[in-house]
Structures are given as structure tokens and as C-alpha cells.
Image (cartoon, rainbow, N blue to C red):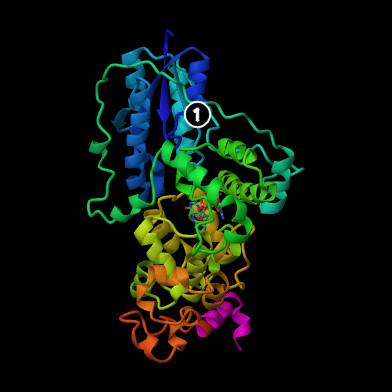
């Protein structure tokens, strides 16, 4: 190998099936792994605290995997273009390769960087490392972006073109220390107050953690995925979301491993969920303003309630008095993750029963989820709030008690996160304010009733949607 290619790692923290890394090896260029900490370049959606905590560990894991192969991660902080140019000058690199990210601010930055590097005579190229399809690859017959999931997925299936995942390289060339390098620890990504301490019994950031999660899912979850994925008390979903967000596993590799696992119907159900992730990226790419603005303009005049700090805090802390909502919000705080069904119920409660703008919830999730992902989070919140593409209509308001009865019939999930309710009979855990007797007395300082009357709040939300229907 002669010339060097900088491999600019971002949200693709893996060595297996990494197209940018592979392209350097295929071109007989010596890969020099680089990570640049530049949260100021993420615009108004710089990573939140839980993402930083995850990234700290994921970077260490990547560095360890590189060291096993004779290389290591060269870490910098600052302006990405300036850092890349200075490393290229110092090493005489011929190329800079990376895998794409589609967040609007990053996309614009990367375009600027590619132009600048190319005009400086470098080969600057980006690959698709994170998606089954690039966001622009699937379009309507009229060449328009999709706004509805099912036709998007139908078109995506017609364009289905799996690529065989590539293995990680066995060895990589060593590189000397570079001027201006810092360390992962010096980036200070770990929370100072240690609120994340409980996360790491459940999560192992990095490529090995992703691999273990996939194996565990294939062994224990896949067979029951379609029936079990809505049950928050069961562990039947893959929990791959943070690993996918940080690019610790490639979606094509997941598809390939599932294909080898049998269970074709369950596999299809799972791949359909992966396709929601693709759809979210498609929507973000074509409608980048939706990170902060309603997709459906009708909601620009919607009378959201003022964000009462006490009500917002009760929601954030899991003290609304509505058990399924509170269990989810406590799971989020304790583990950095929340089950999808409960995300929908908790988001609906905030945007409909409390009638707060969905951005208040999206921002909280952004800061506290280890899988915080601008495309998925935006789509999820706008879907629930009824303001987005292919959204649940606003008038469909999740009833958090009925949802709990249906998806957590024994209240197992509820008492896992709200131990105050353990003394109640299983059937009473969904709406403790209706319970009587000794169990009720033992619910400690759990709110005696919901912070809003559920029926009245529902009526008020519907009236806000259709002011004429109030009379
Ligand atoms: P599985 O059921 O195992 O699904 C496999 C993968 O498919 C997931 O890892 C994820 O990448 C993708 N996926 C599944 N469901 C969805 C979906 N509805 N939309 C998009 N992709 C999906 N997901 C995030 O990754 N990051 C977020 O910030 C995020 N915010 C959300 C906010 C709200 C209000 C809602 C309702 C959903 C949000 N989701 C988000 C989607 C979903 O809740 C999570 O992807 C899922 O719970 C992750 O768990 P899992 O990996 O076990 O999922």
C-alpha cells in the first residue's frame, strides 16, 4: 500500500461491512481512522446527553477493535474541514472517505467539505453505510417522494437489491501520532452526574454489543416477533436501535443474518420495521424542515397548550398518575430506551391529553434516548401528534388505560417501573385511581389521580382540533 486514505468515522462506528473502509482497502490505500468531535456542526440538533454517553463507549469499542488489528482511532475536536485538511497535509493523504449521514445540517456541511477537499486535489467520496436504500433511490412513479409508508415499502421491495456484507479486515496498517490529536476521554462525553449508571447493565455499545444483540434476538425474539413486539413486558424486540443509529451494525447484515435464521414470516415483519427507519430517512431527506415544523400545515394554527413546567416535569419524571405513561418515562430515564408501544402512548399523552407541542416531547426524547435519531424521532413524534406524513389522525387519541389493559394485561411492565403499584391486583394497576381497599392504600406517594382528567382532556383536544364542534 502506498498512499493514505483518511477514513472519517461518524455514525458508522464499525469495521464489518463498512463501505468507506472497504473502498480504501479495495483501492489499495492505507486507511487512517479518524474521528472528529464537532457537535457545533449538528445545528440545532447537537447530540443529547444519552447519545454522548453511548458514543463515549462506542468510540472506545471501535478504538479497541482497531488496535486488535494494528491500527487505532485518531481523535480530534474542532472544525471538521480544518482538521481533515490538516491531517491530509501532515500525512500526504490522497483521499478522504466517509459514509453518509442525512441529517440536514450534516448533509449541507458534508457537501461543503467534499467540494473543499476536492478543490484541494484530494479524492473525497461518500458511501451508503447505514441504509438499505439511499433516501432518493425510492420514488413514486411521478418521480416524487413518498408521503405514505405502504406505497414506499412496496416500491422499496421492487427495488430490493441486497448486497453481501463484507467482513472486517484482519489487519490494518499502524500510523504514527498526529499533531493536534486528543483522546476519547478528553471529549468529556460522559454525563457528569452519572445518571446513566444503570444503562450499562443492559447495553454494550460497539460492534460486539450489536452482534450480541442480534444473536440474542435471533435466538429469543424473532420467532415471536409479530405477536410479541407490542408487549412491553416481554423482551421480544431486537433492541438494535442504538446500534443501528451509531452504525455499529449494517442493515444489510441484519437482513442477511435473518435470512439464514428461517422464520420467513417473522423475518418479513421485522424487515418491515427496518423499512420504517428507511422511510424516516426518506422523509427527513425530502422534507428537512420537519425536524422543527409540522409537515401538515393545518397544524400551524393549532392551539397547543402553553407548556406548563409542572405538567411537563410530571411527564418527564414519570409522575403523571397514568401508569403506562409513567412506566415508560421511568424506563426511559433508567435505561435510555423505551418500548415502541409505550413511546406512542407517552407521546400521545403529552401531545393530546396535555396538548403540548410535540417538540417539547421530541426534545426530551432527544436528550434521554440512547437511540435518539433525528429521522426516527421526528417521524415518531409527528406521527403520534397527527402533524406528520402518514400520521395517525389527530382525533385518534390513545387511551392510556385501554392500551395498558390490552398490551400489559397483568400490569407486569407497569410494576417493573412503578414499584409503588405492586400491592394492587393485576387488573387494578392500569387505573389505580379506580382501585379500593388495602392495595390502594399501599401505593405510597404515587399520584392519587391523573394530572388531568382523561375524558375531559380528550374532549378538550378534540375541541381544539375542531373549534366548531365545541357547542
Ligand atoms: P425493533 O422492533 O426490534 O425494530 C427493529 C428496528 O427497526 C429498530 O431498531 C429501528 O431501527 C427500526 N424501527 C422499528 N420501529 C420503528 C419506527 N416506528 N420508526 C422508525 N424505525 C423503526 N427510533 C429510533 O431509533 N430513534 C428515535 O429517536 C425514535 N424516537 C421515537 C419517538 C416516538 C414518539 C416513537 C413513537 C417512536 C420512536 N422511535 C425511534 C421508533 C421506535 O420506537 C424504536 O425504533 C424502537 O422502539 C427501537 O426498539 P427495537 O430496536 O427493539 O425495535
| Residue count near mark 1 (Cα–Cα under 10 Å), binned few <14, some 14–19, many ≥20 | many
Q: Identify the residue shown where x is 49% and y is 29%.
A: 16
Front-lying residue, 156 or 256? 256
Kindly give the residue lying farthest to the bottom in the view shown: 437
Left or right of 36, for residue 376 = right
Q: Tell me where residue 17 appears, x and y as whole percent.
A: 52, 29
Q: Which residue is mark 1?
A: 18
The reply to whether residue 189 is visible in this rendering is yes
Which range of residues does the magenta coloring cover? 456-471
Mark 1 secondary-structure assignment: loop
Kindly give the residue lying farthest to the top in the view shown: 2
Magenta stretch holds residue 469: yes
Front-lying residue, 229 or 50? 229
Q: Quadrant of the N terminus?
A: top left
Q: Quadrant of the C terminus?
A: bottom right
Left or right of 258, for residue 346 = left
Q: Quadrant of residue 148?
A: bottom right
Prevailing SS of the magenta stretch = helix
Label 1, ligand 1: CB separation under 8 Å: no
Left or right of 279, for residue 85 = left
Q: Tell me where residue 232 appears, x and y as whole percent.
A: 50, 63
Q: Identify the residue shown where x is 61% and y is 29%.
A: 164
* Residue 201 in the image: above or below residue 421: above
Left or right of 253, for residue 199 = left
Q: Quadrant of residue 42?
A: top left
Q: Tell me where residue 205 appears, x and y as whole percent.
A: 39, 42
Q: How many numbered tags mark residues here?
A: 1
Q: Identify the residue shown where x is 38% and y is 72%.
A: 418
The reply to whether residue 48 is visible in this rendering is no
Magenta stretch holds residue 416: no
Q: Identify the residue shown where x is 45% and y is 47%.
A: 242
Front-lying residue, 187 or 255? 255
Amino acid at each position: 500500500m502506498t498512499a493514505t486514505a483518511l477514513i472519517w468515522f461518524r455514525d458508522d462506528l464499525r469495521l464489518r461491512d463498512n463501505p468507506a473502509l472497504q473502498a480504501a482497502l479495495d483501492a489499495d490505500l492505507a486507511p487512517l481512522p479518524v474521528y472528529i468531535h464537532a457537535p457545533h456542526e449538528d445545528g440545532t440538533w447537537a447530540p443529547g446527553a444519552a447519545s454522548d454517553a453511548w458514543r463515549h463507549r462506542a468510540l472506545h469499542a471501535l478504538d479497541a477493535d482497531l488496535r486488535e488489528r494494528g491500527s487505532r482511532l485518531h481523535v480530534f475536536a474542532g472544525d471538521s474541514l480544518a482538521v481533515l485538511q490538516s491531517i491530509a497535509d501532515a500525512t500526504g493523504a490522497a483521499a478522504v472517505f466517509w459514509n453518509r449521514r442525512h441529517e440536514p445540517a450534516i448533509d449541507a456541511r458534508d457537501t461543503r467539505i467534499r467540494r473543499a477537499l476536492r478543490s484541494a486535489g484530494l479524492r473525497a467520496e461518500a458511501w451508503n453505510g447505514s441504509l438499505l436504500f439511499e433516501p432518493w433511490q425510492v420514488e413514486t412513479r411521478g418521480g416524487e417522494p413518498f408521503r405514505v409508508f405502504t406505497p414506499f415499502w412496496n416500491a422499496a421491495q421492487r427495488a430490493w437489491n441486497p448486497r453481501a456484507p463484507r467482513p472486517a479486515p484482519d489487519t490494518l496498517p499502524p500510523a504514527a501520532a498526529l499533531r493536534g490529536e486528543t483522546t476519547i476521554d478528553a471529549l468529556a462525553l460522559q454525563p457528569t452526574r452519572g445518571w446513566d449508571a444503570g444503562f450499562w447493565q443492559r447495553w454494550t455499545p460497539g460492534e460486539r454489543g450489536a452482534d450480541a444483540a442480534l444473536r440474542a434476538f435471533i435466538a429469543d425474539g424473532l420467532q415471536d416477533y409479530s405477536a410479541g413486539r407490542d408487549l412491553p413486558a416481554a423482551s421480544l424486540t431486537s433492541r438494535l436501535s442504538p446500534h443501528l443509529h451509531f452504525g455499529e451494525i449494517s442493515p444489510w447484515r441484519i437482513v442477511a443474518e435473518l435470512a439464514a435464521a428461517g422464520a420467513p414470516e417473522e423475518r418479513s415483519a421485522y424487515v418491515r420495521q427496518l423499512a420504517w427507519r428507511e422511510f424516516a430517512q426518506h422523509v427527513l431527506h425530502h422534507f428537512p424542515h420537519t425536524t422543527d415544523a409540522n409537515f401538515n400545515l393545518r397544524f400551524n394554527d393549532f392551539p397547543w397548550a402553553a407548556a406548563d413546567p409542572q405538567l411537563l416535569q410530571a411527564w418527564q419524571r414519570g409522575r403523571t398518575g397514568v401508569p403506562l405513561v409513567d412506566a415508560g418515562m421511568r424506563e426511559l430515564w433508567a435505561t435510555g430506551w423505551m418500548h415502541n408501544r409505550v413511546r406512542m402512548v407517552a407521546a400521545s399523552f403529552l401531545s393530546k391529553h396535555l396538548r403540548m407541542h410535540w417538540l417539547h416531547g421530541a426534545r426530551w426524547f432527544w436528550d434521554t434516548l440512547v437511540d435518539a435519531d433525528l429521522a426516527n424521532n421526528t417521524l415518531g413524534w409527528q406521527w403520534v401528534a397527527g402533524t406528520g406524513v402518514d400520521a395517525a389522525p389527530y382525533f385518534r387519541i390513545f387511551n392510556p388505560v385501554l392500551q395498558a389493559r390490552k398490551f400489559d394485561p397483568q400490569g407486569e411492565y407497569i410494576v417493573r417501573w412503578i414499584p409503588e403499584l405492586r400491592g394492587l391486583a393485576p387488573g387494578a394497576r392500569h387505573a389505580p385511581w379506580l382501585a379500593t381497599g388495602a392495595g390502594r392504600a399501599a401505593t405510597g406517594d404515587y399520584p392519587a389521580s391523573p394530572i388531568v382528567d382523561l375524558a375531559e382532556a380528550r374532549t378538550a383536544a378534540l375541541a381544539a382540533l375542531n373549534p366548531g364542534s365545541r357547542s
